[in-house]
Amino acid sequence: MSFEFLLSSSGIGLIYALVSLGVFISFRLLDFPDLTADASFPLGGAICGLCIYVGIDPWIATLLGMIAGCIAGAMTGILYVKLNILQLLSSIIVMIGLYSINLRILGIGPYIMDETPRLAGSPNLSLLNAKTIFSPFVAEDYSNQYIVLPLIILGFVILFWLLLNLFLNTKMGLALRATGTNQRMAKSQGIPTGGITILGMAISNGLIALGGSLFVQMQGGADLTIGVGTIVTGLASIIIGESIFPTKRIWAVMLAVIFGAILYRLFIAFALDNEFLQAIGFGTEDLNLITAILVVLALVLPNHLKKRAKKRGSKHD
């Protein structure tokens, strides 16, 4: 594995660290099975890509992509809280609806720029040679992009890790954690659990959409399919992080999730670049299969190792 490939994989891992933090809020803190992630990730990318395509400042475009994700997450929360639709079903409804919306968003750019006579949906949008948040820091010959891009994304990860840590230790943050732990008890203590759930879902999907915004700028294009498997990646990162770095402090747990996302992406990169796997026919088209295998291993191995450790302990006794 080349050094450039390692850095590139680390950069993508850091993007998915933001995604994993978002998934951590919905699944772990709110106990909300949320599939909106698979649509809010490309939604953030689509909004950001569209804004950059029509000439809006990339920093504003990134922010708008994040806000779009917040709205998507809030919609899922509203369907659950206000309309009493099941959590999982609420997220599926929003995910399905966003598929068509993302298609439409990606088709708006060429129409606004008079490149096509009619407004129609599109599965992708090219951002080659477009100005992104990375452009001012990348050399003209792109010689330093493998170092610059991961460093800038790392800055985003550190910033939002700090902000989340601060937020989760405020009264509202503690209310969010209490709502996820025991909603009935939280309600009896006067916590507006409905509003807190909607807020938590908005923050969760905002982070996921921010990851999508950064992803399309790093890859040089927005695509409808970039969201496939987002939720699986987020969950795998959480499981790997919690298994390797077991801790109960909230700041440390979130740090473990970040490391889990980076390690997960490096595992994927190693699997795709492994000569033995290539020799037996594995390639980039098997990415989702490799992802599924890694998730199964991440779920099974920790429990298996714990059982073995207990058996050894009982034998010594």
Image (cartoon, grey):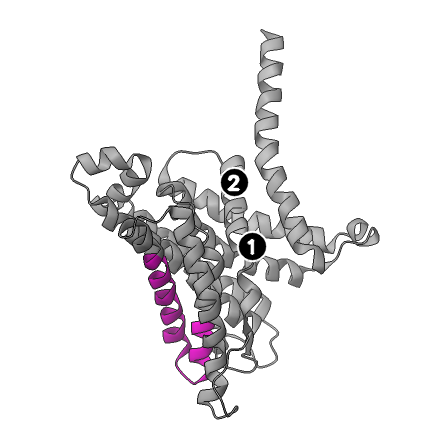
Position of residue 206 measured from the top left corner of the image (x, y, whole percent): 37, 60
Q: Give the mark nearer the N terminus: 1 vs 2.
A: 1
The reply, left or right, for residue 299 in relation to residue 98 is: right
Disc 1 marks a residue whose amino acid type is Gly
Q: Please say whether residue 296 is visible from this viewpoint.
A: yes
Residue most extreme to the right: 279
Residue 58 vertical placement versus 229 (above, below): below
Q: Which of the two residues, 129 or 64, is positioned nearer the viewer here?
A: 64
Magenta-colored stretch includes residue 247: no
Say if the magenta span includes residue 66.
yes
Q: Which residue is mark 2?
A: 239
Magenta stretch bounds: 46-75
Task: Name the secondary structure under disc 1.
Answer: loop
Q: Which residue is mark 1?
A: 229
**Residue 266, position as x, y percentages in the image:** 62, 51
Q: Residue at x 35, y 43 (%)?
A: 30
Where is the N terminus found, in terms of image quarters?
bottom right
Vertical order, 100 against 26 (above or below): below
